[in-house]
Amino acid sequence: MNETKPSRTFYLLTSYYGLLQSFHLLLLARAGWYLIQNRTMPFPAPPPPGGWPGSALPYMLGMGLVDLLAISLGLVYVYCFTIRKEVNLTVGLISLTAALSSGIVYLVGTIPSGAWGANPLAYLAVLLLFSPVLPLYYLIIQQIEKK
C-alpha cells in the first residue's frame, strides 16, 4: 500500500480505467452471449470487407480470455483504489500490462486483415478510448520505482 496521497491525475486516470474496463466487460459479455446463441463471433469492431475468416475465432477467443483477466484484475485494482482507498500498484501493473499486451496483439491481428482500412473511424475510436491507459501505466511504474 502506498502511503503518499495519489495525485488528481492518477485518480482520474484510474477512475477512467475502471469505467473503460466495465464497458469492455459488457462488450465481452455481449459477444459471449451472441456466440452461444448464434454460433458466430461478433467482434465489437467491424470486420474487414470479406468478413472475419473462420480461423479468426481462436484468435478472438484467446483475446477475449486475456481481456477478461485484464478486466477482472483492473476492476479489483480500481475498486480497492476508489472504494477501499488502498493503492495496490502490483495488481494495477499486472492488469495494465495484460490490457496493453492484449491491445498490441489486437493491433497486430486486425491491421493486416484490412479491417482498419475498411473501418478507420471505428478502430481509431477504440485506439483513442484506450490511449489514457498509457499514462496510467507510466504513473504506476513511477510509483513502484519510488518504493
Image (cartoon, helix red, strand yellow):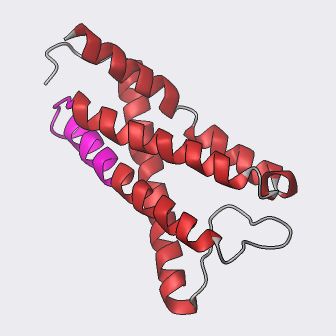
Can you give x and y, in whole percent of width and height, for residue 100 in the image? 49, 39
Residue 71 lies left or right of residue 133; in this view the side is left
- Residue 23, horizontal then vertical, whole percent: 48, 56
Quarter of the figure with the C terminus: top left
* Residue found at x 62% / y 74%: 42
Q: Residue furthest top?
A: 146
Above or below for 7 versus 132: above
Position of residue 91 measured from the top left corner of the image (x, y, whole percent)? 25, 37
Helix, strand or loop for the magenta stretch, by majority: helix
Given residues 92 and 6, the one toward you in this image is: 92
Residue 102 horizontal side relative to residue 53, left or right: left
Locate the N terminus by quadrant.
top left
What residue is drawn where x is 20% and y is 29%? 87
Q: Verify whether residue 80 appears in magenta.
A: yes
Seen in the picture, residue 11 relative to 7 is either above or below; the reply is below
Q: Position of residue 89 (x, y in %)?
A: 24, 28
65 displayed left or right of 104: left
Report the front residue among 50 and 37: 50
Question: What residue is rendered at 43% in x and 30% in y?
Answer: 13
Residue extent of the magenta highlight: 72-88
Residue extending furthest toward the front: 55
Query: In this view of the protein, which residue sits in the foreground, 19 or 116?
Result: 116
Q: Residue at x 56, y 89 (%)?
A: 39
